[in-house]
Image (spheres, grey):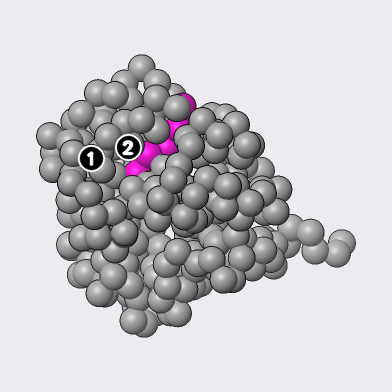
Amino acid sequence: MTDFAAPSRPGRICAAVAAPDTGTAIAAVLPVLDGVDVVEIRLDAMHEVDLALLRDRIGRPLLFTNRPTWEGGACETSEEDRLMVLLDAVGHQAAYVDLELKTAPSLRRRLLERIAGTTTRLIISSHDFGGTPAAADLSETLRRQRESGAHIGKIVTMAHDHVDVLRVLHLQCEARQMGFPLIAFCMGEPGRLSRIITILLGGYMTYAAPDERQATAPGQLSVRQLQAAIACLTGAGAPG
């Protein structure tokens, strides 16, 4: 299923699923499908994957990520093999594929060539699990993502305080001036609020876990927690 229409609520909610096999991934996300717009399948966590079955059983646009160990993921294969899985996902009508900004440009070009003429959109991502860079460095990362050929950028850092959060959220102002869709928020306890606020500030998407036990990153909220927070802040569902 490929559907890029913006939801009625602000931004998009993506349920991030890291499961060992196809059946477990489907079972994890089915209970929360009514509350999400996109489902991310973390291919680097899977020992067995059936892309066609995932597409057919999950009634939401799918985002496929094959995160390498050098950027916080679990994929230990060669870069060539890691890319092949994403190329295969495009062939199975993925709505999105995620590729790291630090990936070799030659591999990125191959993925963009495969995407050309399809409805798949490329998210170029950057993650910093140690902290939040200076504002100038964040702006440079955003610029490089826009110039990479990506359809959407993603910048996620580890927040140690509220100042880190403000620096990352401010990227939405720069992205809007560029006309470039951006996913930007912070990990860690200080960053939890940014996962909610980012889409209220015009961010393209935010991520949540199917439930509290299945978080794929530090500080990640569950789908239900995120829904409740958004409803509280926007007044959606509140008594008249």
Residue 102: image x %, image y %? 17, 51
Q: Secondary structure at mark 2?
A: helix
Q: Is residue 240 left or right of residue 31?
A: right
Q: Residues within 10 Å of mark 1 (few under 14, many from 20)?
A: few
Q: Is residue 147 left or right of residue 73?
A: left
Give the residue drawn at x 51%, y 30%.
52
Give the residue drawn at x 26%, y 43%.
82
Residue lying farthest to the front in this orientation: 48
State the separation of the CA atoms marked 2 and 1: 7 Å
Which amino acid lies under the numbered mark 2 shown in the image of this protein?
A: Val
Q: Which residue is at the front of the view, 185 or 179?
A: 185
Where on the picture, by quarter, is residue 126?
A: bottom left
Which amino acid lies under the numbered mark 1 shown in the image of this protein?
A: Asp
Q: Secondary structure at mark 1?
A: helix
Q: Which residue is at the front of the view, 60 or 37?
A: 60
Q: Which residue is at the front of the view, 27 or 72?
A: 27
Mark seen at residue 81: 1
Residue 222: image x %, image y %? 59, 65
Judging by the rendered image, the residue that carries numbered circle 2 is 85
Where on the picture, by quarter, is residue 28?
A: bottom right
Q: Residues within 10 Å of mark 2 (few under 14, many from 20)?
A: some
Callout 2–callout 1 Cβ contact below 8 Å: yes
Locate the C terminus and report the quarter of the image it occupies: bottom right
Residue lying farthest to the top in this orientation: 117
Asked whether residue 183 appears in the rendered view, the answer is no
* Residue stretch rendered in magenta on the structure: 93-98
In the displayed structure, 118 sits above or below 65; it is above
